[in-house]
Amino acid sequence: MPELKLYSSNGCPFCRKVTSFMSANGIKVDIEDPFSSNDAMFAFKGLTGKTQVPCLIIDGKPMHESDDIIQWMKENLA
């Protein structure tokens, strides 16, 4: 199983789309809100080069775009 972390924000409709899919399919992934603090955002931007959420980190590599994340989860986790 790959190492996974989802960066998500409660105010983001695309993030809710991903987390709703996860809930509906029983998928558990560590979730972090990069907007929770300046330090968290600094670390997130250093990791991904962007401030865009949702972002699924798969073995250290970022994947952006909710539809791409959901498709990857369908193929690999659901």
Image: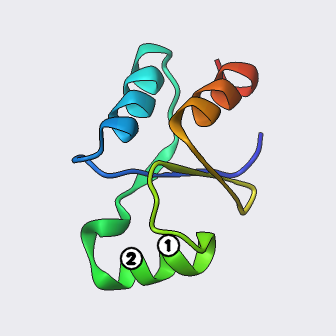
Q: Quadrant of the N terminus?
A: top right
Query: Is there a contact, CB below 8 Å, between mark 2 and mark 1?
Result: yes
Which percent across, then down, holds residue 78? 64, 17
Element type where label 1 sits in the image: helix
Q: How is the image coloured?
A: rainbow
Residue sitting at 37 percent across and 24 percent down? 20
Specify the amino acid type for callout 1.
Answer: Phe
Q: Amino acid at mark 2?
A: Ala
Residue 9 in picture, x, y percent from top left: 31, 52
3D distance between C-alphas at marks 2 and 1? 6 Å
Vertical side of 75 occupied by 58: above or below: below
| Residue 20 or residue 45, whichever sits in front | 45
Q: Residue at x 33, y 34 (%)?
A: 16
- Per the image, the residue denoted by label 1 is 44
Task: Residue 48 in the image: state x and y as whole percent.
Answer: 61, 69
In this view, the residue farthest toward the left is 11
Residue at mark 2: 40
Label 2 crowd (10 A; few <14 / some 14-19 / many >=20):
some
**Where, by quadrant of the figure, is residue 14 drawn?**
top left
| 60 relative to 63, above or below | below
- Reply above or below: 63 against 49: above
